[in-house]
Image (spheres, rainbow, N blue to C red):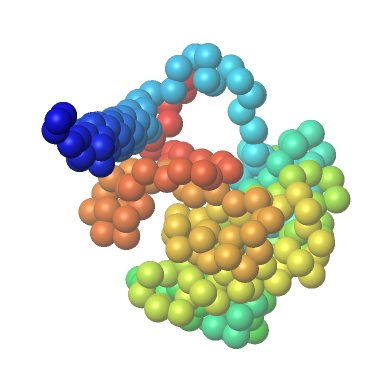
Amino acid sequence: MAPLINKNKKWQLPFKRWHFLVLACTVAAFQVLILSRWHVNEDEDADLGQKPSAAFCARLPPVICAHGGDTSTGLPPNTAAALQQAIAIGSGCVEIDVARTSDNVLVVLHPRDLKFLMGEAWHPGLQVRDLSWQDISKLAWAMPQDKRRAAGAGESDDYPVLTAKEAVQMTSPFVDVILDAKTSGSNPTDEQEMADAIVRLVYSSRCSNCLVWAKSDKVVNLIKDLSPAQRAGYVLMNNSEAAISHGIHLPLRGVQVLPAFDKLSCEN
């Protein structure tokens, strides 16, 4: 009599081998995928630190933007006269420096210009946010006589500090506008309040051609959280200790524009 054959046992071993083979292939494929992605990230990080190629630079022409308006004839920066002159000479874009007063008014003023505007009343460390709009509104640029003549200004012409809304309304119907948000890291709420104020400014002035950037990545991220459709960019800084301490040196992905700190650029 022929011995009985256990058919279930006959097929059990090949099934285990097949199951093990599939599992091994799955693990191997997963490892290859992870390692290849790791190498891609390494390559991306390396590319971010490389000088852009001529082919890359030829994709789109650079945007020429009048920083603070046209100051080539001696007009003070960020003033109505300088902004209007930039439009008159055919600039396609103006960049204005936006700071916030202690009573939450956005003004067109670079903090470093306080020294020139305030004279003896200025002291080191003074920021725009330390002053009220009433204080700022009393400040005005007085031009030296030689620059006054070169600019064709009258003897009594002085240039007051503008609010950001005045500057946007004056320029946005004619040219693109870049708002450079100026904040101070010493105030923990400054970045959030600046982001809120910028979003309100763009909305109230209906500035669809406004782009916002800042040296503070946090301000840009907060603005994008509040208004995802807002065009925004990060400022590429040099690797100073201050920049590194704020994480500004880290690679950034997905930005819409990346202006470079002036000392990182060259004539070419």
Front residue of 205 and 170 = 205
Q: In this view, does 156 lie above or below 258?
A: below
Foreground residue, 150 or 67?
67
Q: Where is residue 29 in the image (x, y as percent from the top left)?
A: 31, 32
Expressed as whole percent of the image width and height from the top left, the position of residue 89 reads 78, 34
Q: Is residue 11 left or right of residue 194?
A: left
Q: Tell me: 232 left or right of 174.
A: left
Q: Where is residue 68 in the image (x, y as percent from the top left)?
A: 63, 49
Residue 69 vs residue 119: left or right? right
Residue name at image x 78 percent, y 57 percent: 207
- Farthest right residue in view: 173
23 or 92: which is nearer to us? 23
Image coords of residue 218 (percent x, y): 45, 63
Q: In this view, does 181 lie above or below 13?
A: below
**Would you identify the image quadrant in which residue 151 lies?**
top right
User: Residue sitting at 37 percent across and 43 percent down?
Assistant: 251
Q: Is residue 128 above or below residue 41?
A: below
* Residue 133 appears in the figure: yes
Task: Tell me where residue 261 sits by quadrant.
Answer: top left
Q: Does residue 142 lie above or below 75 as drawn?
A: below
- Residue at 38% x, 70% y is 185
